Image: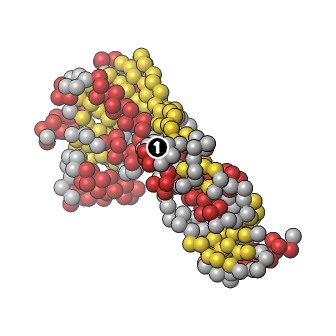
Amino acid sequence: MIISVASGKGGTGKTTVAVNLALSIIQNVRFLDCDVEEPNAHLFLKPKIQKTEPVNIPVPVVDETKCNYCGKCSEICEYHAIAVLPKSVMVFEQLCHGCGGCVILCPEKAIKEKNRKIGIIREGICKNEIKFIDGLLNISEPMSPPIIKAVKKRAEEQNSKRAEVVTIIDAPPGTSCPVIESIKGSDYCILVTEPTPFGLNDLILAVEVLRKLKIPFGVAINRSDIGDEEVDKYCHKENIPILMKIPFDRKIAEAYSKGIPLVENLPEYKRHFQELFTKIKNSL
Amino acid sequence: MKIAISSAGGSMDALVSEQFGRCAYFIVVDSETMKFEPISNSAAGIMGGAGPEAARQIAKAGVTVVLTGSVGPNAKSALDSAGIKIVSGVSGSITVKQAVEEYLKK
């Protein structure tokens, strides 16, 4: 089973929910931190990293001795990563998505590909035997989906018997490509939000995404006793289950700031996260 | 010589656009005859890579000088590679015609 944890708005508590859910489930758990622009689950799960691998994307290299500047490569490039000027060709590697279309189309066979490293994936083991994989995008790189794909692919390679393992995916915030890449293929998605106008606005956007992807989902409201009632009302109106509420509590914030998982500092939460897991299992 | 000016409109009386890659038009002016030709900038609305794409268009038109407000790093390397001289810092409060005249005076 794959459960992803996402949110429209950033800083609502995705990692808190994902990490503590992973630590509360009495089953084989695998944890994927797909927030590769700023992974932070490792601060709480403290995995022993056993393996680090580079993630590359193929980018074109043009042999200008063969090129006749016909411009076909530049015409098909949706991201304008190749510019064919009257007497030269320029490749903008950071704009390239690595589709390889230019290589196939070049009539002069003047384009080859080389690998460009954009980040790494890390693999390890945490206590409670939780398998851990995360990705780290290099600073200044604009594109995270290839790293997220690499994290998910590595997880698939580890174990093909999906039913026996609960995979928890900590997704990046927002509603754009990196989020889609992280949550697609999930059996269930937990949307973490907060009871504020910002939380609600971005929750509505995230709900639209999940409905389009046809992934079953429910909402967890963090800092639930501050703010207003609008998130509750919205969920009620839209028939979206509210799976969990975490109150605003200084003790939670203190543990978080020290990198201590909530369920270790306040063990009574283990039961709440187990109930969350049961609710999800029962709804599928 | 052909001069391209990033512009908000398709005529010599339109205001200069301070954006290079995403301007609405390039006005290509022949400095000998002062005849002009507008190029609708197909890069204006694209998601990424507008700078190089805009540079490609004016290079194709045979331009050797571009007058504009500012040029991004990718556009700059494309213009440099195409051998197009960049004159940046042109204000968006003057017209294309004024910008060309001022440049030719120097």
For the C terminus of chain A, the image quarter is: top left
Residue in the image at 66% along x and 74% along y: B27
Q: Position of residue B49 (x, y in %)?
A: 55, 55
Looking at the image, residue A117 lies above or below residue A244: above
Pointer 1 local density, CA inside 10 Å: few below 14, some 14–19, many at least 20: some
Residue drawn at (34%, 27%), measured in percent from left and top?
Answer: A154
Q: Is residue A204 left or right of residue B44?
A: left
Q: Residue at x 40, y 29 (%)?
A: A134
Q: Chain of mark 1?
A: A
Residue B54 sits above or below residue A31 on the image? below
B97 lies above or below B69: below
Quadrant holding the N terminus of chain A: top left
User: Is B30 situated above or below A212?
Assistant: below
Judge by depth and name the residue closer to the eye, A228 or A36.
Answer: A36
Circle count: 1
Depth order, front residue of B22/A279: B22
| Residue A232 in sight | no
For the point 30% across and 53% down, the residue is A209
- Secondary element under disc 1, as helix, strand or loop, is helix
Q: Position of residue A215 (x, y in %)?
A: 22, 47
Q: Position of residue A173 (x, y in %)?
A: 40, 45
Q: Position of residue B29 (x, y in %)?
A: 71, 75
Choose top left, top right, bottom left or bottom right for residue A144. Answer: top left
- In front here: A261 or A42? A42
Residue A4, visible in the rendered structure: yes
Q: Nearer the viewer, residue A8 or B78?
A: B78
The amino acid at mark 1 is: Val
Q: Which residue is mark 1?
A: A103
Seen in the image, is B61 located left or right of residue A15? right
Q: Quadrant of residue A251?
A: top left
